[in-house]
Image (tube, rainbow, N blue to C red):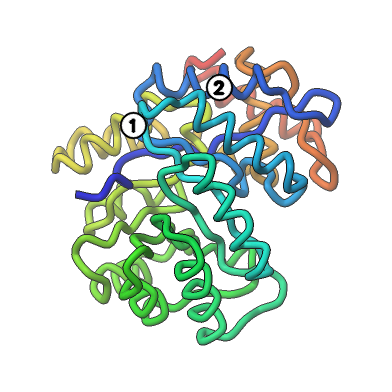
């Protein structure tokens, strides 16, 4: 059975005055594990990997692995739009002791389907670590087609995909074309329960930053076939899932965590910017109604 099952949190990276808040990150990891999160994903989109230096990237992964101390899997974000850089970051994640690497499709340069395959093949051959592909066309301007995912799935250490297309038709095709043991994880909170219902293995979640217990419970119920409980949690979580995207991710998640007293500062790094007052008020209403503040 794949270790990439259940609710993995795409954890935010706390900063104070633009510098990595190491104690803040350790505290967030402890909060997650205490609340039943099934896995931790540092240095993803939600972790603001795009504005981290390589040294910071390595430090966040090392600190996460050390703090987690084997209690749950650590899936480190290591993707880039340069294959050479992706290999370097993936190698660093392996050296730090991560359980796997989450690799986004190269953004901005818009590779062909063959280019995508060759990119992932090159990294998989260079670094012997379990790799989860990450398809998020809204961020990258390229959609990795199910046939390309299935080709990649034939490479021994490419073991799964995070599908953030919000398209259950595409996700169904991926599941249909890939081996049974291939982990298909939702990359959109609101499709996480339906993704499991059609054969997926879980979610890499933004909402789990603020509601780890309920996200984990929803995935547990869905994976156990308890549809009534999974649906109940899906609809309980839905307003929170929507609120996490009223501004660019991870701005709402970080703002909410600051409101909850879980991090000292909710400020992202430029070019992301703090929420405007109207959105902040909306977010506060939702997390108050949920009982988080």
Can you give x and y, in whole percent of width and height, for residue 197 in the image?
A: 22, 53
Can you give x and y, in whole percent of width and height, for residue 1 in the image?
A: 19, 49
- 264 sits to left or right of 227: right
**Residue in the image at 72% along x and 16% along y:** 264
Quarter-wise, where is residue 200 in the image? bottom left
Quarter-wise, where is residue 69 in the image? top left
Earlier-in-chain disc, 2 versus 1: 2
Q: Quick one: label 1, few (<14), some, or many (20+) residues within 10 Å? A: many
Q: Mark 2 points at which residue?
A: 28
Q: Is mark 1 on a helix, strand or loop?
A: helix
**Residue in the image at 21% along x and 60% along y:** 181
Quarter-wise, where is residue 263 in the image? top right
**Residue in the image at 38% along x and 37% along y:** 73
Can you give x and y, in whole percent of width and height, for residue 196 in the image?
A: 26, 51
* Quadrant including the C terminus: top right
Tag in front: 2 or 1:
2
Q: Quick one: label 2, few (<14), some, or many (20+) residues within 10 Å? A: many
Instruction: Name the residue nearer the viewer: 246 or 25.
Output: 25
Q: Which residue lies furthest to the left in this view?
A: 225
Q: How far separated are the C-alphas under marks 2 and 1? A: 16 Å
Q: Mark 1 points at which residue?
A: 216
- Above or below residue 276? Residue 92 is below
Instruction: Name the residue nearer the viewer: 115 or 251.
Output: 115
- Above or below residue 142? Residue 221 is above
């Amino acid at each position: 059975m794949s270790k990439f099952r259940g609710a993995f949190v795409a954890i935010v990276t706390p900063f104070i005055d633009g510098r990595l808040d190491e104690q803040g990150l350790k505290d967030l990891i402890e909060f997650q594990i205490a609340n039943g999160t099934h896995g931790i994903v540092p240095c993803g989109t939600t972790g603001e990997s795009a504005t981290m230096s390589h040294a910071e990237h390595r430090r966040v992964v090392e600190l996460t692995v050390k703090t987690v101390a084997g209690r749950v899997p650590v899936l480190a974000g290591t993707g880039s739009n340069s294959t050479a850089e992706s290999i370097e970051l993936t190698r660093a994640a392996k050296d730090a002791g991560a359980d796997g690497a989450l690799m986004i499709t190269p953004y901005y340069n818009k590779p062909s389907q063959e280019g995508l395959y060759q990119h992932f093949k090159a990294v998989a051959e260079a670094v012997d670590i379990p790799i989860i592909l990450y398809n998020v066309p809204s961020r990258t301007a390229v959609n990795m087609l199910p046939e390309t995912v299935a080709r990649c799935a034939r490479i021994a250490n490419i073991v799964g995909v995070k599908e953030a297309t919000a398209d259950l038709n595409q996700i169904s095709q991926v599941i249909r074309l890939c081996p049974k043991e291939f982990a298909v994880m939702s990359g959109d909170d609101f499709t996480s329960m339906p993704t499991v219902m059609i054969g997926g293995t879980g979610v890499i979640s933004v909402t789990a930053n603020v509601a780890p217990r309920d996200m984990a419970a929803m995935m547990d119920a869905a994976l156990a076939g308890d549809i009534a409980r999974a649906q109940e949690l899906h609809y309980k979580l839905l307003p929170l899932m929507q609120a996490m995207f009223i501004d660019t991710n991870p701005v709402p998640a970080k703002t909410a965590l600051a409101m909850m007293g879980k991090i000292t500062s909710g400020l992202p790094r430029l070019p992301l910017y703090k929420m405007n007052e109207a959105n902040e008020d909306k977010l506060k209403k939702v997390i108050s109604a949920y009982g988080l503040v």
